[in-house]
Amino acid sequence: MDRRDFMKTTVNGVAAAAMAGLMGFPALAAATRRITQNRRDMKKIIIIDGGPRRNMNTAGMLRAFAEGAESAGEDVEVKTVRLYELDYRGCMSCMACKVKGKASNICKFKDALAPILEEIALADGLVLGSPIYFGDVTGQMRTFLERLAFPWLSYNDYSMTATKRMPVVLIETMNGTPERNNDNGYGSMEYCLASALGEPEHIIAYNTCQVKDYARFELAGFSEDAKRRWREEHWEKDLQKAFDAGRKMAESILR
């Protein structure tokens, strides 16, 4: 099943469920929901969206990933968290995660990010997505990674230990081309992710369109026609790569 087939199947399934409710089977629908919610063998994938725009390139790639994961079956739950919608800070250097006898590999600072970090600790897969600004992930993503990774670090032996290991996918969207870009991606934080969780898989969408209408902005350094041609040739393929990666992760954690 590819991304387009999944979308058709999902829409048809929702329509059928709605019709069943209208035809007088609400108890059956409610029981089905309870069974799904209470199923103990459910696996969970957390997607962290580090981009500011909810309907542009990074969000699109992450939606495709989520669709791919969900296409693997009902035993996979996918949750997407948008960092730009949370009120949180970077590492506060409170050292609460390093207190003797109370050391923790989950950040102890209480704010909007705290419950997300706790969910990640128990998840079965992690996906991080960010546009590339000035060669790096967004400030929100870097701030999130500080809070995620510092509790993993032991100052006794400098090991990196998370609650559990899990598959990780890193998604980047950027204005640069494969031949011409200044991408440092997730930088030194990628080493932390690899050490604590496992070697990540990379998916990169190059030469993305920054805006929908180039005529409105001072962007004369770019050829809109060239951008459009690249998008027509590559964007659907990029989305399919994200979809396939989502299905692959879900299938791997279901085995």
Image (cartoon, rainbow, N blue to C red):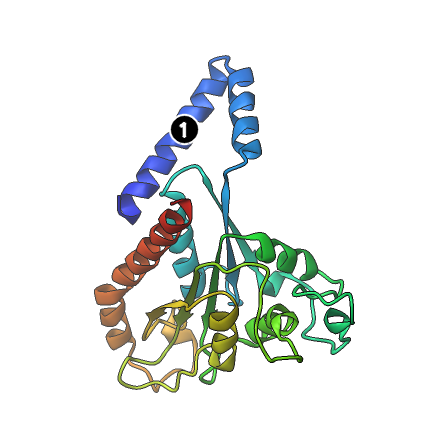
| Residue shown at 36% from the left, 43% from the top | 72
Question: How packed is label 1: few (under 14 Cα within 10 Å), some, or many (20 or more)?
Answer: few
Figure check: 33 above or below 199: above
- Residue 229 falls in which quadrant of the image? bottom left
- How many marks can you see? 1
Q: At 58% from the left edge and 53% from the top edge, which residue is drawn?
A: 122
Amino acid type of the residue tagged 1 in the rendering: Ala
Residue 130 in percent (x, y) is at 47, 70
Q: In which quarter of the image is residue 141?
A: bottom right
Quarter of the picture holding the N terminus? top left
The answer to which of 162 and 135 lies nearer the viewer is: 162
In the rendered view, tell whether residue 38 sits above or below residue 171. Answer: above
Q: Where's residue 50, x and y in %?
A: 53, 67
Closer to the camera, 194 or 170?
194
What is the x, y in percent for residue 194? 46, 71
Residue designated by label 1: 15
- Which residue is at 60% across, 71% downward? 149
The location of residue 148, given as percent across then percent down, is 61, 68
